[in-house]
């Protein structure tokens, strides 16, 4: 099986097409190596890290309930978990382990796409991504990426545009 045929990439491609984003689906690129970080993806694409939409899955705790939360953040900075918790009304935002990520997205860490998950995942989309005409995000596998825009990410995910930057990055 090639990366193009990987079930998560196929499912994500279908999600793009169903959302009317066939041009994004046609833009999926399979890279030579896995790019599990914004810096690695930026190097492979020859762009600045800020134009990479990192897909971060967190464990959002609301009382006794834990839900996945996807934060699509610019590779230019880190997400502030306290700020993110306040934005979504969570008691706590915690790191998700690989099993939690796979269970809730059907995809592996480093390749989590904005959509194509078994069920919709609540999503925040970093406002900083709007400063780029084009951004690149994972397409379901750590070797796959695709070009998109801030507006397309918000529409595709049904997400909320938000300032998720760490306070240290604000200065």
Image: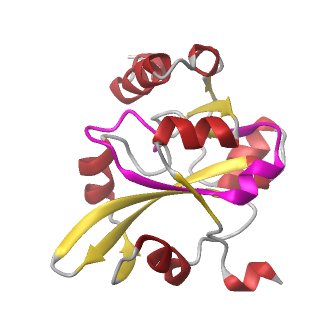
* Residue 123: in magenta span: yes
* Rendering coords of residue 27 (x, y %): 66, 19
Residue at image coords 57%, 43%: 154
Q: Tell me the quadrant of the picture where the C terminus can be found.
A: bottom right
Hey, which quadrant is residue 65 in on the image? bottom left
* Residue 134: in magenta span: yes
Q: Nearer the viewer, residue 141 or 75?
A: 75
* Residue 34 in sight from this viewpoint: no
> Is 55 left or right of 44, judged from the image as shown?
left
Q: In the picture shown, does residue 104 fall above or below 82?
A: above
* Residue 115 in sight from this viewpoint: yes
Q: In the picture shown, does residue 43 fall above or below 92?
A: above
Q: Nearer the viewer, residue 32 or 122?
A: 122
Q: Tell me the quadrant of the picture where the N terminus can be found.
A: top left
* Rendering coords of residue 123 (x, y %): 46, 54
Residue at image coords 33%, 54%: 101
> Is 121 left or right of 138, judged from the image as shown?
left
Residue at image coords 67%, 72%: 165
**Display colour scheme:** secondary structure
Q: In the picture shown, does residue 21 fall above or below 117?
A: above
Residue at image coords 43%, 18%: 18
Q: Nearer the viewer, residue 109 or 90?
A: 90
* Rendering coords of residue 21 (x, y %): 57, 20
What range is drawn magenta here? 112-136
Q: In the picture shown, does residue 149 fall above or below 164?
A: above
* Rendering coords of residue 71 (x, y %): 51, 59
């Amino acid at each position: 099986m090639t990366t193009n045929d990987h079930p998560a990439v196929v499912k994500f491609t279908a999600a793009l097409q169903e959302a009317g984003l066939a041009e994004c689906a046609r833009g999926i690129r399979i890279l030579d190596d896995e790019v599990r970080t914004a810096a690695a993806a930026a190097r492979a694409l020859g762009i600045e890290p800020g134009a990479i939409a990192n897909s971060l899955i967190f464990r959002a705790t609301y009382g006794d309930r834990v839900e996945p939360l996807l934060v699509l953040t610019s590779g230019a900075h880190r997400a502030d978990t306290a700020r993110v918790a306040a934005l979504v009304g969570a008691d706590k935002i915690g790191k998700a382990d690989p099993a939690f990520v796979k269970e809730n997205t059907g995809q592996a860490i480093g390749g989590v796409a904005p959509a194509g998950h078994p069920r919709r995942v609540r999503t925040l989309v970093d406002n900083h991504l709007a400063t780029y005409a084009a951004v690149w995000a994972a397409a379901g596998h750590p070797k796959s990426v695709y070009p998109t825009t801030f507006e397309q990410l918000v529409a595709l995910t049904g997400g909320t545009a938000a300032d998720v930057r760490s306070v240290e990055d604000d200065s």
